Amino acid sequence: MPRSRPALAALVLCWAGMAEAAPDGAALYAENCAECHGEARLGGTGPALLPDNLGRLKPAQAAEVIRGGRAQTQMPAFEGVLDEAAIEALVALVYTPPETVPEWGMAEIRASHETTGAVPAEAPIYDADPLNLFVVVETGDHHITILDGDRFEPLRRLPTAFALHGGPKFSPDGRFVYLASRDGWIEKIDMWGLEKLAKVRAGINTRNLALSHDGRFVLVGNYLPNSLTVLDAEDLRPLAVIPVADIRGTGSRVSAVYAAPPRQSFIVALKDVAEIWEIPIGPRAVKVSGLAHSNESGAEEVVDSADPFPIRRILLDEPVDDFFFTPDYRVLLGSARSGDRVVAIHLDVGREIAELPLPGMPHLGSAAAFEWQGRQVMATPHLRDAALSVIDIERFEVVDEIETLGPGFFLRAHPATPYAWVDVFFGPDADAVQVLDTRTLELVRTIRPSPGTTAGHVEFTRDGSHALVSVWADEGAVVVYNAHTLEEVKRIPMRRPVGKYNVHNRLAAAGD
Ligand code: DHE
């Protein structure tokens, strides 16, 4: 039935009234959130609340966190304090990009820098092999546990910044470890004294960090701002902020930074532009620049002289990231943006030398190398396909595809055992890890540490005798297996232990 004019007018008035009454997200934020998350949403005691930083949290989950709070953190529950409309307004606000790109340059980084006053210990304060310790990253309540890798006993638990991501990086002698959080906090821990020494916020939205071959510099790669931050590894003092843009000036996020110890350089993967950067450290810098300048092979290379961290640009046809390096660091394999092929780039000549069709979105960053039938190969899980690909890393060809129970995230091998372990991670079998016999390329065992709960990320002890697997739950565990018999040995309760890192093995994997 058609509405009368007065009825329509009343409806319009009513809508106008509703619009007026709609909660003001910014005002609600200022009143309830700014104290911990910062006035400009850049973070404070709580994490940054910007769309890029929240990328992995769905809006419905964010609403749930506002309603119910976050266990084991200072985030309170707002249910009963804020109504649903207010919660929705807050969610809408935090997923809206700020009007101006937040500034995070040298001044802001310097102002965030803090040392704790702790002095590095003169000797280990524990009776355990310092090179067989594990750093277990527990994102359930944002702590790390330092675990004795012989007795499988926790030695110390330390609070960390919110949401660490990427592997912690050890100094070449294993004395110190550096951690990076998604919100840009970098922390340095003394692995003898088991104390935090310093922290600094190197970016607003950070990918990861790398430590130079000589342990002098920490390089941090950021999404926001588009920058690299160089820190003094001694005390995390900022030394340089390098804006990231391609040769034409188009800005780019940094996908990840890597140390290349045999090259004495850093390698930088860029998300949005078709370049890879190499930043030489120390005397090698001169050599690499010379090589690039005298390159007559036609390879497209340009060397900037942005002292003291000169950038060698390797120009590509399209962006590649998620790198795997051959053990000598002469060649890197990178995933093309389409996720359906891998390119091999020779770092000395600065050009693509091979292309491999790998349609399942290989996760090269977590691949592992081993010897198979006298050939140097690596195996990589795929993020999209239920398969492992085995690639000859001298001839750059795929030698085998092995069907798994589901797409996987992390794979680990150790020279002392023929068994490599890969997790399943996605799909109905996410509670399983599978064991690959690297002699036959057969999957020989499926292990479900906690049926029904996601299992992932494997790390070996220093001698390869045991494999440690995470049960990825807030009330989770690190489960220790005998790496030869594949039997469970011990279960250590942990709060969502996303990853664990053995000092010796991580240094060996980095080529130190
Ligand atoms: Fe990671 C390492 C990128 C999502 C857990 N992850 C890395 C590295 C990169 C990377 C480039 C190597 C950095 C290093 O070690 O210095 N990760 C990405 C992504 O692009 C992706 C897919 C999307 C994103 O939001 O960043 C992603 N990663 C995740 C997760 O969702 C994981 C499973 C849980 C989490 O807490 O974030 C996760 N990533 C990890 C872990 C490592 C890692 C545990 C270290 C692996 C190692 O053994 O070294």
Image (spheres, grey):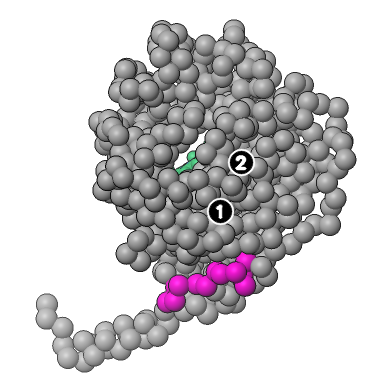
Q: Is residue 283 above or below residue 410?
A: below
509 within the magenta span: no
* Figure quadrant of the C terminus: top right
Taking the spot 37% from the left edge, 55% from the top edge, the residue there is 302
105 and 424: which one is in front? 105
462 and 211: which one is in front? 211
Of helix, strand and loop, which one carries label 2? Answer: loop
How many numbered marks does the figure carry? Answer: 2
Q: Residue furthest left?
A: 2
Q: Is residue 309 above or below residue 371?
A: below
Q: Disc 2 designates what residue?
A: 213
Q: Which of the 4 image quadrants contains residue 183?
A: bottom right
Going by the numbered disc 1, the residue's amino acid type is: Val
Q: Disc 1 designates what residue?
A: 220
Taking the spot 40% from the left edge, 39% from the top edge, the residue there is 347
Going by the numbered disc 2, the residue's amino acid type is: His
Q: Which residues are magenta?
A: 98-109
What secondary structure is the stretch in magenta mostly built from?
loop
Left or right: 463 with respect to 221? right
296 and 494: which one is in front? 296
Instruction: Of the two numbered discs 1 and 2 on the same chain, state the one appearing first in sequence.
Output: 2
